[in-house]
Amino acid sequence: MKKKLFALVALLASVTMGANAQVYVGGSLGFTSSKISGGADQDGSSYKILPEIGYQLDDCVSIGLQIGYSHGYAAFGSLTVTDVKAMMNTMLSAYTDINEDGLKLNSFTFAPYIRYNVLELGDRAKLFVEGSVGYTNVKTDNVPAAAGTGGGDGKLDVLEIAVRPGIEIAFSNRLSATAKLGSLGYMSAKEKESDEKLTRFGLDCDSYNILLGFNFHF
């Protein structure tokens, strides 16, 4: 599976690199550091690296691919919809950062997408809608049952189909920033060593679910 994914990445790169100014590269980086004090002090950290390569077909349509790795929290994306999710996300991400008793959560993500520019806001900003189909392979070690995974070690295959609204702001002809706010989509996560399967469909648009990135245009 991974060989096929990397072959698709190489094919996309070879096609887009021949398109001169139509090519852009970029991505997202994330890092958190957490500490719990008031008893037995504990601390730790997590991170994600999500590079992106894309090709602008015309003034309205772009295609691209995001591929990357994360260690720690938030491997699944963005489809939680309960009112208490902000606090739950914060507590779980802190617990994962601290990595108590060898807790580990690592994921590999592969997500091609198509982006359509809906509206131009002056000369520098554009509103867009992005549709993506993403695959994530997640490996967990020593996860407690309270974290919602059933406990123990495991491997998950996760499929996510999502539509996300966003905005792109151009700082110059070469550099731009993107922000994607929420998502409407479907997610399926299957545990490899058992029959357990999670499926989820939801709409999630709020300030706790923003994906930020930067792109460099050739």
Image (cartoon, rainbow, N blue to C red):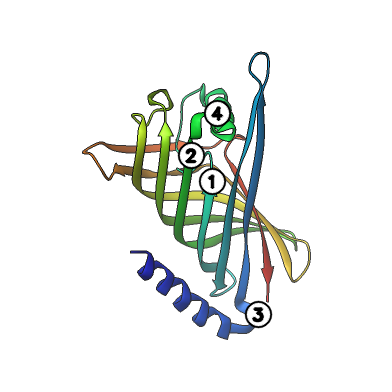
Q: In terms of image quadrants, where is residue 169? A: bottom right
The residue that disc 1 covers is 71
The residue at the far bottom in this view is 18
* Residue 190 in the image: above or below residue 7: above
Instruction: List x then y, in percent, for residue 209.
Output: 57, 38
Q: Which residue is mark 3?
A: 21
User: In terms of secondary structure, where does tag 3 sit?
Assistant: helix
Q: Residue 178: percent from the left, percent from the top?
A: 65, 55
Residue toward you, 43 or 126: 43
Number of residues whose C-alpha sits closer than 10 Å to that of mark 2, classed few (under 14), some (14–19) or many (20 or more): many
31 is higher (above) or lower (below) than 170: above
Query: Does the residue at mark 3 contact the one at mark 2 (Cβ under 8 Å)?
Result: no
Marks 2 and 1 sit apart, C-alpha to C-alpha, by 8 Å
Q: Nearer the viewer, mark 3 or mark 2?
A: 2
Q: Give the quarter of the figure containing the N terminus.
A: bottom left
The residue that disc 2 covers is 104
Q: Nearer the viewer, residue 170 or 71?
A: 71
Tell me if label 2 and label 1 are in contact, CB under 8 Å.
yes
Which residue is more in the foreground, 68 or 95? 95
The residue to which callout 4 is attached is 95
Going from N to C along the chain, the mark reached first, 1 or 3, is: 3
